[in-house]
Amino acid sequence: MSKPIPPIFISHGAPSLPLEDIPARTFIKELGIKYKNIKAVLCISAHWVTSIPEVTANPWPNTIHDFYGFPEELYQIKYWAPGSPELAKKTYNMIEDAGLEALKNHDRGLDHGTWIPLILMFPEADVPVIQLSIQHHMDPAKHLNVGRAISELKNEGILILGSGGALHPLGYASFLFGAQPDPWAIDFEAWLTKAVTSGDEESLLNYRRISPYPERAHPYPDHLVPLMTVFGAADNKEGKVAHKSWYAGDLGMGAYIFDE
């Protein structure tokens, strides 16, 4: 068995990330060096939500510009990384073999939760990429179970990448460039980091009930559940902090890596 590729959860921030000189951009760009020898990426993006898990089986996925109000140059970017129908089939089979429902999607492209970080990590678009959706129910335990189902992929040269946000308080916080994070945001980030680094599965699964200010940090859980899938895929549940920074006040840009 080859050495596992460490699964990682990152915060992809705003779609304008590739254009901004901030610590999170530098961190994600440097990940391309760390993961230079991988065979492919399986990305769990916060921006693809379906009823049951779906995997992209499109051999040449297009670039989805699923955002508005950003600089025009972002809408001109095309990230033409190849897909991998073979990896999609294997991922689909793993999920089905675990007793879970799944679908293959032959039309879906790459949304910005995937191509924004990957254009920094692999600017040549020479690494095959597939996406795995999150589900409408946003159930942490069910997303963790999907991670368990696909865990073996990390032993086959595949990077399991969760792309969301450590804190994503859209609809709650007012984002002000240059602002410092509020105390409630700092409290949630500290709680999340402690839960991840101690491998506290029970706390993560019950974060809505026991974490500080979950309704502020994640008014909608789409940016946190990719972490559950990455956590489920890890052998060593005690993750490490790979990056910590803030953006425009309360947008948490933390990243957590496992099995390193």
Image (spheres, rainbow, N blue to C red):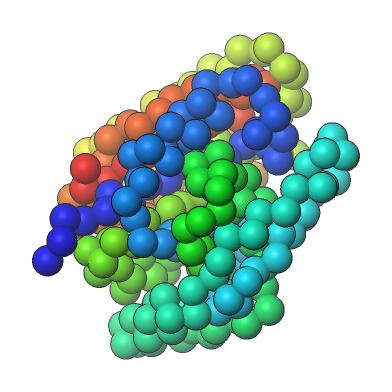
Q: Relative to residue 50, is residue 145 drawn left or right?
A: left
Q: Relative to residue 81, is residue 39 drawn left or right?
A: left
Q: Quadrant of residue 107?
A: bottom right
The answer to which of 174 and 102 lies nearer the viewer is 102
Q: Relative to residue 102, is residue 206 drawn left or right?
A: left
Q: Quadrant of residue 152?
A: bottom left
The structure residue drawn at horizontal position 42% and vertical position 46%, both measured from the top left corner, is 9
The answer to which of 215 and 24 lies nearer the viewer is 24
The structure residue drawn at horizontal position 43% and vertical position 81%, both measured from the top left corner, is 86
Query: Which quadrant would the C terminus be assigned to in this image?
Result: top left
Query: Which quadrant would the N terminus be assigned to in this image?
Result: bottom left
Q: Relative to residue 189, is residue 106 depicted above or below?
A: below
The structure residue drawn at horizontal position 31% and vertical position 73%, both measured from the top left corner, is 149
Residue 97 appears in the figure: yes
Q: Quadrant of residue 87?
A: bottom left
Residue 218 appears in the figure: no
The answer to which of 20 and 177 lies nearer the viewer is 20
Percent of width and height locating residue 241: 33, 31
Percent of width and height locating residue 44: 50, 59
Percent of width and height locating residue 131: 53, 66
Q: Relative to residue 84, is residue 168 depicted above or below?
A: above
Q: Relative to residue 28, is residue 144 depicted above or below?
A: below
Label count reads 0
Q: Relative to residue 230, is residue 105 drawn left or right?
A: right
Percent of width and height locating residue 38: 34, 55
The structure residue drawn at horizontal position 63% and vertical position 20%, both measured from the top left corner, is 21
